[in-house]
Amino acid sequence: MVLQNLMNINWSKTKEMAIVTKGAGSPFDDLSFSDNIVEQVHSFKLLGVTTDDDLKWSTHVNTILF
């Protein structure tokens, strides 16, 4: 897919993460563009920092320590 600014989306690197209260589940339907469904994740690493959907540091700290 080519956007108006002529940038291509790398679908293998595009992720969706909903930040919700505990036990609420995913409040969103699958996100898709041009027949490409965006993968839903509970955590991801960006610029060396692992972020969780509950905004706690445990996953990041465990990644560094182990």
Image: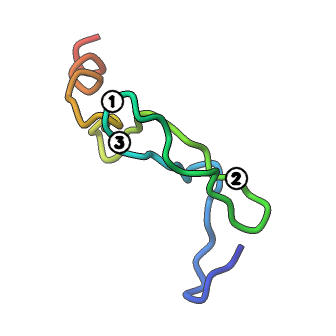
- Element at label 3: loop
Nearer the observer: mark 1 or 2; the answer is 1
- Distance (Cα) linking label 3 and label 2: 21 Å
Above or below, 16 against 25 in this view is: below
Among the two numbered marks 3 and 2 on one chain, the one whose residue lies closer to the N terminus: 3
Is residue 64 found left or right of 4 in the rendered image? left
Three-letter code, disc 3: Val
* Image position of 25 with respect to 1: above or below: above
* Numbered label tally: 3
Amino acid type of the residue that numbered disc 2 sits on in the rendered structure: Ile
Among the 4 quarters of the image, the one containing residue 64: top left
Q: Is residue 65 above or below residue 5?
A: above
Residue at mark 3: 20
Query: Residue 8, image x and y in percent?
Result: 63, 72
Q: Secondary structure at mark 2?
A: strand
- The residue at which mark 2 appears reads as 37
Bin the neighbour count of mark 1 within 10 Å (Cα to Cα): few under 14, some 14-19, many 20 and up.
Answer: few
Residue at the image position 29 percent from the left and 39 percent from the top: 48
Say what secondary structure mark 1 lies in.
loop
Instruction: Confirm or deny contact between disc 1 and disc 3 (CB under 8 A).
Output: yes
> Residue drawn 53% across and 49% down?
15
Looking at the rendered image, the quarter that the N terminus falls into is bottom right
Q: CA distance from mark 1 to mark 3?
A: 6 Å
Mark number displayed over residue 10: none
Q: Which residue is mark 1?
A: 22
| Position in image of residue 25 (x %, y %) | 47, 34
Q: CA distance from mark 1 to mark 2?
A: 25 Å
Q: Position of residue 10 (x, y in %)?
A: 62, 59
Q: Residue at x 55, y 53 (%)?
A: 14
- Point out residue 6 in the picture as x, y percentages from the top left corner: 60, 84
| Kind of residue indicated by mark 1 | Lys
